[in-house]
Amino acid sequence: MEFNAYAKLNLTLDILRKREDGYHDLQMVMQSIDLCDRLTLSPARGEGEMRTNLAYLPADGRNLAQMAAEAFRRATGKGGAVDIAIEKNIPVCAGMGGGSSDAAAVLRAMNELTGAGLSLMELAGIGQNVGSDVPYCVLGGTALAEGRGEILTPLPALPRCHVVVCKPAFPISTPQLFARVNVRRITCRPDTPGLIAALEAGDLLGVARRMYNVFEDVLEPRRRSEIDAIKSVLIDSGALGASMSGSGPTVFGLFDREDTAREAFGRLSGLYKAVYLCQTV
Ligand code: C5P
């Protein structure tokens, strides 16, 4: 069986508090886009193998997709060994939830293959120990994710629009970025209730204007400058709003017009290798 695993973007990312377990309570409005990995699952003859088209990715129990298959078997007692082949199209370590989305697709696939009949919310519950973004990725679409990422509220869909996504070449470590955050020092936060009200009103410009990610404030200055430069290209080309996704370094812009989105895509493609012209899902 073949499944799509869609990339996610953070329309907002706010950090509310540090928890005693070392994680942070977050408030994030998430959105799926049509940039996706392709997963093929088949019943295994042997112990179950994993393949990906990226040689440097672990293809064993450290891969979130394998962890998800194991978590599903433990939770339901169903499902034998499966072979999993992943065609990776979502950039890795980008803040777009690629690994989490693969894990979520495996949970949905195993639910179908075994006929277990779990609801999406039950599958999201199984996914929460695989990774903090896995529950949202099970649900997909437009949703509010709170707590560690496991408290989900579906939201009215973002009005269909064009999305230009650009991943600069430098890596960002998620745990290291969280370690740089001092929650009491966060001065600039996204207007999450205002953005949700704009979603309810179907107001794309109102959503785009309210997008913000508190991680942008704790980036090293030279990284921050590069993120800001990409945002400027997006806005200069006609984006209604632009923001960094997740713990970065991916930056994206929302466009109501295809011609302006294409212009931004063209300009950024001349500067960066990983640039995508997408639509919301
Ligand atoms: O759960 P996941 O493996 O995706 O999280 C990666 C790291 O990000 C965690 O080890 C933790 O340092 C940080 N994190 C956090 N609070 C969250 C989610 C992740 O501090 N809500």
Image (tube, rainbow, N blue to C red):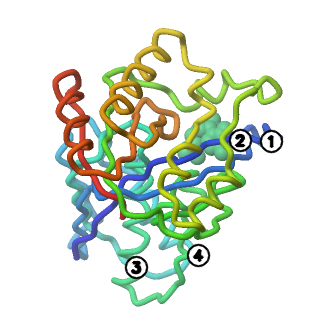
Label 3 or label 1, whichever comes before in sequence order: 1
Label 4 or label 3, whichever comes before in sequence order: 3
Figure quadrant of residue 84: bottom left
Q: Is mark 2 within 8 Å of ligand 1?
A: yes
Figure quadrant of residue 161: bottom left
53 versus 42 height, above or below: above
Which residue is at a point 50% across and 17% down the rendered structure image? 224
Q: Amino acid type of disc 2?
A: Tyr
Return the residue nearer the eye: 115 or 167.
167
Check disc 2 and report its element: helix, strand or loop: loop
Label 2 or label 3, whichever comes before in sequence order: 2
Q: Which residue is mark 4?
A: 121
Marks 1,2: beta carbons within 8 A: yes
Q: Amino acid type of disc 4?
A: Met
Which numbered tag is attached to residue 212?
none
State the image coordinates of residue 117 (x, y, percent, origin top left).
Answer: 48, 89
Label 4 or label 2, whichever comes before in sequence order: 2
Task: Tell me the CA gap for discs 4 and 2.
Answer: 22 Å
Q: Which residue is mark 2?
A: 23
In the image, which is nearer the foreground, mark 3 or mark 1? 1
Q: Quadrant of the N terminus?
A: bottom left
Task: Tell me the CA gap for discs 2 and 3.
Answer: 31 Å
Which numbered tag is attached to residue 79?
3
* Crowdedness near tag 1: few (<14), some (14–19) or many (≥20) residues, C-alpha within 10 Å: few
In the image, which is nearer the foreground, mark 4 or mark 3? 4
Q: Which residue is mark 1?
A: 19
State the image coordinates of residue 188 (x, y, percent, origin top left).
Answer: 70, 30
